[in-house]
């Protein structure tokens, strides 16, 4: 049951049309995504245009109703959760691709367009998005902008923030910030669109996005390297970046524990490739000719083996073999099947610190619980590590969970990393943000929030603790 | 003569040391850069540490003295100009390179380090900055961050904003915002460092910067193409991006008028290359082997000539020839020698709009003054055009200058471009910003300025008109 006044809902129906306000039984037509709590508000409004979004916001301000904006509901930190008394604004009907240009290598889309839909449209022009995520079928461009999504190509093409050329945003008073430039170079005043990127819907509602696209390579080649250490893996990344032919497209590291899990489950085994390498590194090159790319991977391996005689390599020789290799990295579901609700962490570590950081964390976690031996994998070329405990969520209650966070987060700012690399803050990391960040930064965030959302109407309690105004709502 | 109180200057001397406050005759030891008005304040303070910067700011707040921060003083829009009653803070002594890592491909530097100094340090690790400017010997990393500098590689590596991983900033109250991450992926709350990038010293004083570096290619090859049209030049850019071997590093366009000026002056001529091509395009590829890169350029030309039989090409076969080709693009001084103070414009245009935009502008300028036939050149792969009038500054007074701006800027936002691509707003473009930008954006800029600099102490009157508080100082 929602607790919004019927008159308010009637006003909303007038704005978006009767069928586009979902409550009561009609709510069942809407997928709640990763968590049922996303639909906790019990009412979802689905505007079709920026004008309708603006009218909805004005109506919310007039009625003092907070708004939670939804994209694909694939976020992992509760940024889309909603409570009774709030209104969910879904961007699902803002689903038009407005412009794709092969000359400009730019697309302009409405916020609700999925990554997959944009990838398909770009592909018709031999272009790609330069950013890719496993949740591509649900994740929306607006949501990816709001959360500053990352993925596997960030070392080369940047994160979502670096892909965005222009934004249109409905502000907290319903006014429309229109800054839909389609150019990389823009020094015309404060670039305020970067306030909305990564703000998780707390500063404005993104309605349109202009994004950079990249030329699609004609061919790819993929190899799995078995390596003795993080240092050897980092050397291999550099060899990939320095490839004499082709360009590095991915460098995904799989530490031993997770590798044994996925390779064991999928019964993946190849002669001369042991499952016992401390680190495995999946490397993809893109370029014009597949055979030349495969030769280049072979050359990189030959150079590598001179320094590390124990290194192994498997070069995929078919699309099916390539898919098998990627599955070793991407089948994270296996962890959660074994350890339901396993606590997972998402940190960025400067590359030269990764080895020391992991050694320290693994030892620290053992001190918290001698059975802890986490699964570790991640985007090695940009230092983004995913660390998932080998324990079900219920086995890691309050105090123990805090001890784990202390181990993983304590020094992360000091060494120049980030305790939340690509998953954001949402609801789940609000306390950690306050505890870990530079206090001047947190105070400034609060000042910006107050300056942009004086009525505290936008996604209250997310990213920042609810302020006085929000708590009193 | 400055008009700061002697007691205030004594306070400053206590903070930075006697010799590091320059006024009166001592001021002559300081180069004013592009304009004498930069030193209009008559007093320059040179702190050596972030702590000293913080103390200077607190002292200014206590005494109600506005601060103008200086980097290399190479800006073209008056962002560094200062007036009596203000204090210039120079970052010249914040000149330490704190960290360069070949594994991380990251550097951390103090704000006053020049681009050239960083390039030299990076080069020792076979790395490059991914951004380059003709003013590299003077331009500082702090200044480039403050102005969101661009240059020739932005289509590939982004502008300064995209290169910055972390910042340390002294805020308007003297507190220190410390966010010196060295990682690409960081979704830990609002990414407020982007407020300071491109704010031209009006929101904070940048003291340290962590920047991404890129692997340096082993070899380069350069070609000059003579082409029949903008469309043919854009096709060539795409062929460069799709190169079967190597990677596109530059695609600089030189329209006919400017080409005749530079090639004529330097007596550059090559058999079979006419000076009459409507557009010339300087293309560089980087990669492992020079010969293979030159062959690739040859292949691109062969493909090109099938569609455009009149196209010409000159491939540089020595370092000297390459320098000759670059001089045809970079010797902009020739324009100003012929037309002192020639009004110059710096716009970003979405690539698919460039042809139409230029045709309309050239016709519009002829209507303003039938003798106008501007020099046009720019960074074609990112749509950044530099347009310089063939008239001395004094020949284009008030009303005529406004008519020129109307022609060049009128529709630029509508077509998704920017009226200030890489030079910023400073003092000279403040009125244009208000006139051209989305009013919601300008109002929001004002709100952000007021939230971050309540005492209006930082570079007043730049980027935004002086607010009430500033005007009353």
Image (cartoon, coloured by chain):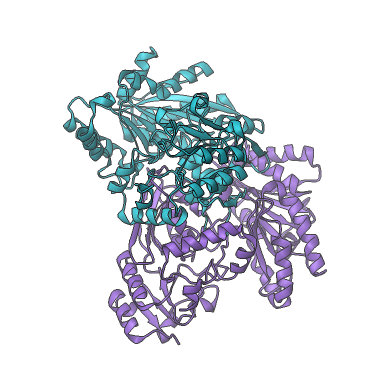
Chain colours: A cyan, B purple
Q: Nearer the viewer, residue A32 or B109?
A: A32
Residue B46: quadrant of the picture? bottom left
- Residue B107 in the image: state x and y as whole percent: 39, 52
Examine the rendering and report whether any part of residue B130 can be seen.
no
Residue at screen point 55% across, 70% down: B465
- Residue B21 in the image: state x and y as whole percent: 36, 79
Q: How many marks?
A: 0
User: In the rendered view, would you say A156 is above or below B25?
Assistant: above
Q: Nearer the viewer, residue A175 or B288?
A: A175
Residue at screen point 34% across, 18% down: A337
Q: Quadrant of the C terminus of chain B?
A: bottom left
Query: Is A345 on the left-hand or right-hand side of A31?
Result: left
Examine the rendering and report whether any part of residue A374 can be seen.
yes
User: In the rendered view, would you say B415 is above or below A352?
Assistant: below
Q: Nearer the viewer, residue B360 or A463?
A: A463
- Residue B152 in the image: state x and y as whole percent: 58, 53
Query: Is A42 on the left-hand or right-hand side of A120?
Result: left
Residue at screen point 52% across, 45% down: A205
């Amino acid at each position: 049951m929602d607790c919004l006044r019927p008159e308010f809902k009637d006003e909303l129906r007038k704005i978006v049309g009767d069928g586009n306000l979902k409550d009561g039984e009609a709510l069942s037509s809407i997928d709640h995504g990763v968590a049922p709590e996303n639909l906790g508000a019990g009412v979802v409004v689905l505007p079709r245009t920026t004008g309708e979004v603006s009218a909805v916001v004005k109506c919310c301000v007039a009625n003092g109703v907070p708004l939670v904006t939804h994209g694909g509901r694939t976020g992992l930190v509760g940024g889309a959760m909603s409570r009774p008394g709030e209104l969910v604004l879904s961007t699902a009907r803002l689903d038009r691709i407005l412009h794709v240009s092969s000359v400009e290598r730019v697309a302009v889309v409405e916020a609700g367009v999925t990554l997959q839909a944009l990838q398909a449209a770009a592909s018709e022009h031999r272009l790609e998005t330069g950013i890719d995520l496993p949740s591509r079928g649900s994740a929306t461009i607006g949501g990816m902008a709001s959360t500053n999504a990352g993925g596997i190509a960030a070392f080369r093409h940047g994160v979502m923030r670096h892909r965005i050329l222009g934004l249109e945003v409905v502000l907290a008073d319903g006014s429309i910030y229109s800054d839909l430039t389609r150019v990389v170079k823009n020094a015309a005043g404060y670039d305020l669109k970067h306030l909305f990127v990564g703000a998780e819907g707390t500063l404005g509602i993104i309605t349109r996005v202009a994004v950079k696209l990249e030329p699609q390579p004609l061919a790819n080649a993929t190899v799995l390297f078995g390596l003795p250490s993080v240092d050897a893996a980092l050397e291999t990344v550099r060899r990939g970046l320095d490839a004499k032919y082709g360009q590095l497209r991915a460098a995904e590291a799989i530490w031993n524990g997770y590798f044994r899990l996925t390779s064991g489950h999928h019964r993946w085994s190849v002669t001369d490739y042991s499952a016992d390498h401390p680190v495995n590194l999946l490397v993809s090159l893109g370029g014009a000719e597949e055979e030349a790319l495969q030769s280049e991977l072979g050359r990189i391996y030959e150079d590598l083996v001179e320094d590390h005689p124990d290194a192994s390599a498997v070069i995929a020789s078919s699309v099916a073999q390539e898919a098998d290799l990627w599955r070793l990295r991407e089948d994270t579901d296996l962890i959660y099947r074994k350890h339901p609700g396993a606590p997972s962490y998402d940190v960025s570590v400067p590359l030269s610190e990764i080895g020391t950081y992991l050694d320290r964390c693994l030892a620290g976690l053992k001190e918290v619980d001698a059975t802890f031996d986490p699964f570790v994998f991640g985007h090695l070329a940009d230092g983004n590590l995913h660390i998932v405990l080998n324990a079900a969520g219920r086995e890691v209650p309050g105090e123990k969970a805090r001890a784990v966070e202390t181990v993983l987060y304590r020094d992360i700012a000091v060494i120049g990393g980030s305790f939340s690399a690509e998953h954001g803050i949402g609801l789940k990391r609000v306390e950690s943000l306050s505890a870990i960040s530079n206090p001047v930064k947190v105070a400034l965030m609060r000042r910006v929030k107050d300056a942009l959302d004086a009525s505290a109407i936008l996604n209250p309690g997310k990213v920042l603790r609810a302020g006085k105004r929000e708590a009193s709502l």
